[in-house]
Structures are given as C-alpha cells and as structure tokens.
Image: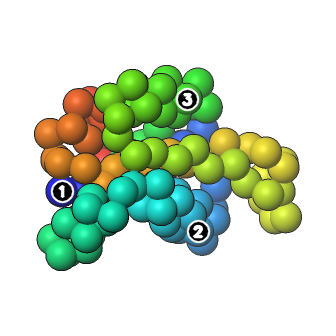
Amino acid sequence: MKQAIVARTDIGMGQGKLAVQVAHASLSAYEKADKGLQDQWKQGGQKKVVLKGQSERQLHELSEIAKREGIPSAVIRDAGHTQLEPGTVTALAVGPAADDRVDSVTGELSLF
C-alpha cells in the first residue's frame, strides 16, 4: 500500500508552499478512500512518495486515469493567499491503494 503525491515543478513554489500542498493532497485523497483502504494504509506505515509533475494538464490526465481505475485521488487548488494565484492547481495525490495500482498511474514519473 502506498500513496503518490505529484507536485508541479513548473509554477515556482517555495519549499514551504510545496510541503503544505503535498500535505493537503495526501489528506484529501486519504479522506476519499474507503475505511478498509484507510486502515490498511495506516497499519502499513502510511507509505508515500512525492513525484515531479510538469503541468496542470498532466495532473488532470493522471487524475482521470486514477478515477477510471477506481483509485482514490485528489487534485489540489491553492487558495491564493501567498505565492500563487487563487485556483492554481498545485498537486495531485493518488492512493492509498496497492503499490502496483498506484504505479499504474504514476510509475513513469521521477522522484521529487
């Protein structure tokens, strides 16, 4: 079991902003998972990987694949209070789900 968080590299987020967006994505996708997946993931140590995303379009495309596959996912849009314009897509979380299911969506991406 794992979760992959894809964060955009093309919008110039600072390290703190990046950390916050990754956290938002992780929690949002977790909340969309059913209780069984939540429990399994928590008991397995809540494994996460953070990956590089290249564009808003890429995150939306990966999100659609996750939805078709029935994998919990969440696209995060920034509120615009600090570095980014309101509504800017910053991150996507895929999972928690079995490693191979998450990899079927995000396996081609590089680690952050």
Can you give x and y, in whole percent of width and height, for residue 108 in the image? Answer: 26, 30
Judging depth in this view, the residue of 30 and 81 nearest the camera is 30
Residue 90: x and y in percent read 62, 47
Q: Position of residue 11 (x, y in %)?
A: 66, 43
Q: Nearer the viewer, mark 1 or mark 3?
A: 1
Residue highlighted by disc 3: 60
Q: Which residue is mark 1?
A: 1
The answer to whether residue 17 is left or right of residue 92 is right
Q: Residues within 10 Å of mark 3 (few under 14, many from 20)?
A: some
Q: Residue at x 78, y 52 (%)?
A: 84
Q: Position of residue 20 (x, y in %)?
A: 58, 68
Question: Does residue 50 appear anywhere in the picture?
Answer: no
Which residue sits at x=69%, y=49%?
Answer: 77
As drawn, the label of residue 47 is none
Q: Quadrant of the N terminus?
A: bottom left
Left/right placement of residue 1 relative to residue 72 reads: left
- Of marks 3 and 2, the one in the foreground: 3
**Mark 3 / mark 2, whichever is N-terminal:** 2
**Amino acid type assigned to the residue bearing label 2 in the image:** Val
The answer to whether 12 is drawn above or below residue 18 in the figure is: above
Amino acid identity at mark 3: His
Q: Which image quadrant for residue 10?
A: top right
Q: Residues within 10 Å of mark 1 (few under 14, many from 20)?
A: many
From the image, tell me which residue sits under label 2.
20
Q: Earlier in the sequence, mark 1 or mark 3?
A: 1
Q: CA distance from mark 1 to mark 3?
A: 23 Å
Query: Residues at badges 3 and 2 in contact (C-beta under 8 Å)?
Result: no
